[in-house]
Image (cartoon, coloured by chain):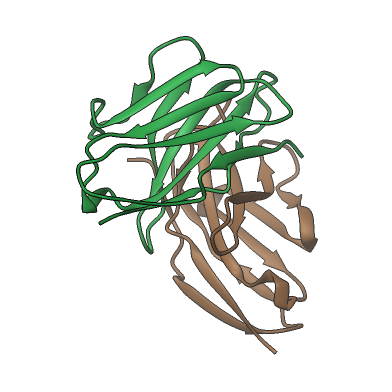
Amino acid sequence: GAVVSQHPSRVICKSGTSVKIECRSLDFQATTMFWYRQFPKQSLMLMATSNEGSKATYEQGVEKDKFLINHASLTLSTLTVTSAHPEDSSFYICSALPRANTEAFFGQGTRLTVV
Amino acid sequence: AQSVTQPDIHITVSEGASLELRCNYSYGATPYLFWYVQSPGQGLQLLLKYFSGDTLVQGIKGFEAEFKRSQSSFNLRKPSVHWSDAAEYFCAVGPYGGSQGNLIFGKGTKLSVKP
């Protein structure tokens, strides 16, 4: 199957700093990528939909200025958590949808811990 | 409201025993249905999906699921569980004909396997 690489897999940062998470489709082009957040013992919640070359669409309740999404190419989307706080600590996971729109492929996720 | 319910938070089965993980959904239209597996610290792997046609769907790793419209259910089954099946399992629903990246997930069922 298609491979989606997410980097870093784990990151610890200090409160007030920003953290960038990358999501790459390694062997296909993805016009659309999705960012999810997973709280402990909870399900994945869609944060935003990222389309190449256009602004991301955020789900209700997700702060656009805090979670900056950039989809600059057909193989890369980035999520930047700005001015991180401990409550932003979570597991963030992306998925990428190939042009054929058959199924979305998930990255391995990023565990963010803000101290 | 659209939702996915996985009533069992944690299930323990003996290796070699049969398995059934329950999933019920509430959706305003004909849905696409998915089952994913997540190993610790890993991303999601698609086990199987239902779009249309035969309501009994075969997936990878010996899993199958049956779509029952009258019960709004999509339960996952495996006749004989292996120790390597221990993981978290997520049921998800997506819009029929829509983007398959924009999914609504259940809270997951953690599967433990006894030797």
> Which of the two residues, A38 or A60, is positioned nearer the viewer here?
A38
Q: Is residue A54 left or right of residue A60?
A: right
| B61 to B97, vertically: above or below | below
Q: Position of residue A79 (x, y in %)?
A: 40, 32
Residue B15, quarter of the rendered image: bottom right
Residue A70, quarter of the rendered image: top left
Which quadrant is the C terminus of chain A positioned in? bottom left
Q: Is residue B30 visible?
A: no
| A50 to B64, vertically: above or below | above
Q: Is residue B58 visible?
A: yes
Q: Position of residue B60 (x, y in %)?
A: 77, 54
> Which of the two residues, B27 or A64, is positioned nearer the viewer here?
A64
The chain assigned the colour green in the figure is A
Q: Is residue A65 left or right of residue B63?
A: left
Name the residue rendered at 53%, 77% in the picture.
B11
Name the residue rendered at 66%, 42% in the picture.
B50
> Which of the two residues, A24 or B28, is positioned nearer the viewer here?
A24
In the figure, what tint was chain B given? brown
